[in-house]
Amino acid sequence: MRTAGEKQFYAFALILALLKDLPKDWTVRLLYDIACQIHRSLLKWNIMPEWTGQIDFGVSVFHAYSHQWTCQLWYHPWKSEKWGLSDGEGCERFWSELRRLIPGLRVTGVFEDYRDMG
């Protein structure tokens, strides 16, 4: 889990941080580009076994079509009623809209740290 590409331990850390603050009887539905790999790793390496039953995994629609057919059968959100009409791309759309703010927020010139000036 420490190779190039998607770093799964970041996903595990985020999931664990979320689940620690939620009631044990809640189910978390996770739509992620590589949710199938995350789910497989959790089961294969017995990572967070106490939480595994509390999570439903799905692959966001845009990415699901590039996965193998068996993966799509298990993880495509539109093949299960529990996901409703969600496509898992809400954050992608949000960040796409924010990209217009980047030029105005970019810092140019010499940065002086005024905290160090006594």
Image (tube, grey):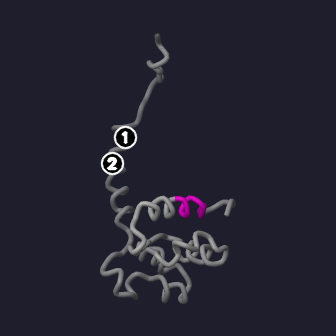
From the top left corner, tell me how far across and down residue 42 is, in percent: 60, 73
Badge 1: how crowded within 10 Å, few (<14), some, or many (20+)? few
Left/right placement of residue 47 relative to residue 33 reads right
Residue 11 falls inside the magenta stretch: yes
Magenta region, main secondary structure: helix
Q: Residue furthest front?
A: 24
Q: Is residue 80 above or below residue 52?
A: below
Q: Are marks 2 and 1 in contact (CB under 8 Å)?
A: yes
Residue 112 falls inside the magenta stretch: no
Q: Is residue 71 above or below residue 97?
A: below
Question: 63 or 25, which is in the foreground?
Answer: 25
Q: Which mark is residue 100?
A: 2
Give the residue at x 62% y 62%. Answer: 5
Give the residue at x 44% y 72%. Answer: 30
Question: Which residue is labeled 1 in the image?
Answer: 103
From the top left corner, tell me how far across and down residue 11 is, in percent: 53, 62
Left/right placement of residue 19 relative to residue 36 reads left
Magenta-highlighted residues: 6-13
Quarter of the image that includes the N terminus: bottom right
Identify the amino acid type marked 2.
Answer: Arg
Identify the amino acid type marked 1.
Answer: Pro
